Amino acid sequence: MLKDKVETLLAKALEENDSLFLIELSVSPDNKIKIVLDGDEGVSLENCIEVSRAIEHNLDREEQDFSLEVASAGATAPLVLPRQYKKNVGRKLKVKTQENQFEGELTAATDDMITIEWKAREPKPVGKGKHTVQKRQEIAMADIQEAKVVLKF
């Protein structure tokens, strides 16, 4: 089956560059192969070309016609794997859970949990006015519905 062949070839290609990892692999009924990659140091055009060649050169178009697209996860694509969170420590994230939405700096990430920190203006406990407080929230990976890096221009 085409998908099995692609998975095997992709695994081999990713072994050769272990800073890259798979985000998505799909094969449509009309043999359109789509591979989305991310990398600990990002994904270059050269990385996409290498993976594409490793797969394309080992499939026989005479046996089965196909189209192949290898792309990097977009800057605005939601984070889906713990490895993506780990590479984005120090960046600003917007995180949605069932109950809340948080926006702040990702200060820690493990396989099970992330920590977000931000500053907030709150009423003073005594007296009038507001003061700035440092907030911190730990969020279990299982509770995250969507998380995206907030881009600054």
Image (cartoon, rainbow, N blue to C red):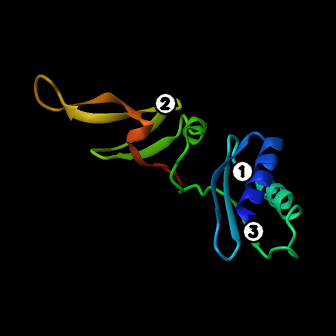
Q: Residues within 10 Å of mark 1 (few under 14, many from 20)?
A: some
* Residue designated by label 1: 43
Relative horizontal placement of residue 17, taking residue 34 as reference (left or right): right
Q: Secondary structure at mark 1?
A: loop
> Which amino acid is tagged 1?
Val
Residue at horizontal 22 percent and vertical 33 percent from the top? 122
> Which amino acid is tagged 2?
Thr
Image vertical order of residue 101 relative to residue 72, above or below: above
Q: CA distance from mark 2 to mark 1?
A: 23 Å
Residue 107 shows which numbered tag? 2
Mark 1, mark 3: which one is toward the viewer? 3
Q: Secondary structure at mark 2?
A: strand
Kindly give the residue lying farthest to the left in the view shown: 127
Marks 2 and 3, the one that precedes in the sequence: 3
User: Which image quarter: residue 140?
Assistant: top left
Q: Position of residue 74 (x, y in %)?
A: 60, 58
Residue at horizontal 68 percent and vertical 40 percent from the top? 40
Q: CA distance from mark 1 to mark 3?
A: 17 Å
Kindly give the residue lying farthest to the top in the view shown: 126
User: Which image quarter: residue 41?
Assistant: top right
- Locate the N terminus and report the quarter of the image it occupies: bottom right
Of the pair 2 and 23, the residue shown nearer to us: 2
Q: Position of residue 94 (x, y in %)?
A: 42, 47
Relative horizontal placement of residue 42, taking residue 85 as reference (left or right): right
Q: Position of residue 115 (x, y in %)?
A: 43, 31
User: Which image quarter: residue 113?
Assistant: top left
Relative horizontal placement of residue 146, taking residue 127 as reference (left or right): right
Residue 68 shows which numbered tag? 3
Relative horizontal placement of residue 123, taking residue 4 as reference (left or right): left
Callout 1–callout 3 Cβ contact below 8 Å: no
Residue 93 shows which numbered tag? none
Marks 2 and 1, the one that precedes in the sequence: 1
